[in-house]
Amino acid sequence: MNPSFHKASARQNSGGPSPVPGRGGDRENQPRADIAKLEVDIIGLVDRSTQDLRLAWRQVHRTEPPAGLSRDLLIRALAYRLQEQTHGGTSPAQRRRLQTLAREFEKGSGSSDPGIMLRTGTTLARQWRGHTHTVLVREDGFEYEGHHYRSLTVIAERITGAHWSGPRFFGLTKRASALIGAEAGR
């Protein structure tokens, strides 16, 4: 086996795309020919000249590549784009989360703790006054009692009749006192 082929296929298969139905990331249902073509295209990037790579960047991104971008990064970025076209890109929920983190970072209020990230299909359960309430995490929000919600806080308020932090209500955040106690013990 050619060493560059091995590296390219290992890089492609490590982590892989999300197997979320409808996002093009379901490898089992994807024709083997598409995956083989992708591997050949990625391997072909290595053999192209830097000038050809810059031209490919312009065609894909409709702009000049960033000044000083190394040949290696050009190849990696173009390979990522090829994989994205074949397997599907970032989900809307992931894009929203990244935009939120970027805004926090720009304000200087961002922390390195990304918080708990819920995967699509996860079920949250909370017992409240003798009843168990379950919420299904969807790609575009949450489902509770057959209705769609964009926020856990709205669901928590509907359940309790009072304003609650949705993530705190469902046990997804650490309590402030626990955080303070943990920092004091350091």
Image (tube, rainbow, N blue to C red):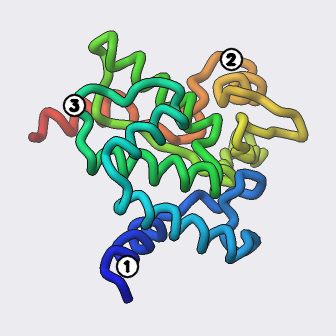
Decide which of tag 2 and tag 3 comes sooner along the chain.
3
Image quarter of the N terminus:
bottom left
Q: Is residue 186 above or below residue 80?
A: above
Tag 1: residue type? His
Tell me the residue that label 2 is attached to: 162
Taking the image as shown, residue 63 lies to the left or right of residue 141, namely left
Check whether the beta carbons of the residues at disc 2 and disc 1 lie within 8 A of each other: no
The residues bearing labels 2 and 1 have C-alpha atoms spaced at a distance of 57 Å
Image quarter of the C terminus:
top left
- The label shown at residue 6 is 1
- Select label 1 or label 3 by which is in front: 3
The residues bearing labels 1 and 3 have C-alpha atoms spaced at a distance of 28 Å
Q: Position of residue 163 (x, y in %)?
A: 64, 16
Q: Position of residue 123 (x, y in %)?
A: 69, 52
- Residue furthest to the right in view is 146
Q: Residues within 10 Å of mark 1 (few under 14, many from 20)?
A: few
The residue at 39%/67% (across/down) is 11
Res 10 → quadrant: bottom left
The residue at 77%/24% (across/down) is 158
Q: Look at the numbered disc 1 and give the secondary structure of its residue.
A: helix
Tag 2: residue type? Ala
Tell me the residue that label 3 is attached to: 68
Taking the image as shown, residue 45 lies to the left or right of residue 109, namely right
- Residue furthest to the left in view is 186
